[in-house]
Image (spheres, rainbow, N blue to C red):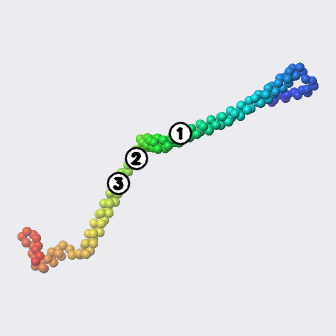
Amino acid sequence: MFLKEKVRPMSRVTPKREGLNRLQARGRKSAFKAKERIGPASEQAREIAAQRLLDARTWSAPRLEKAAKYVETELGPTIGKMLWRAAKKVEPPAYKRRGRANSLVMLAATGVLGAVGVIASRRNAINPLTRSEHQADRGRMGSEPSTDGQVRIP
């Protein structure tokens, strides 16, 4: 809790108070005189500062453009390559999937065996004669095997 200030009525001005009032009035008067003297100088300083700031901006703009071009064309790609190399060094090794290669080989082998089976069954369907019937059919044609075991067809 804050203590309440006691407000005293100003019944009469004390000598100490009069001295303080005189000093305040003298300070106001001195500040006004200083403002009149320093006012034009501060205006001039403001104009000079504005001109110098404009000169500094005029001088620095081309240099900033040159630095930006350097960063964009030379430094940027160099840093990009450096970061790329660092990323490759940090990246963990790739996981090799062995099961996929084996399953593809098995699938291809199954397909080849299936194709061979289809071709063999079609040959048997087209040529229904068995081996013994072939030999009997050749015998009727009059060709007998020779001494070397080969059948000669006339």
Discs 2/3, front = 2
Mark 2 or mark 3, earlier in chain = 2
Quarter of the picture containing the C terminus is bottom left
State which quadrant residue 110 falls in. bottom left
Say the numbered circle drawn on residue 36: none
State which quadrant residue 115 falls in. bottom left
Judging depth in this view, the residue of 142 and 97 nearest the camera is: 97
Q: Is residue 135 left or right of 36 when viewed as pictured?
A: left
Say the numbered circle drawn on residue 94: 2
Mark 2 or mark 1, earlier in chain = 1
In x, y percent, where is residue 145? Answer: 9, 73
Which residue is identified by label 3? 101
Which residue does the image show at 35% across and 56% down from the upper left? 103
Question: Above or below — where is 67 with respect to 120?
Answer: above
CA gap, disc 2 and disc 1 = 46 Å
**Local secondary structure at mark 1:** helix
Judging depth in this view, the residue of 84 and 137 nearest the camera is: 84
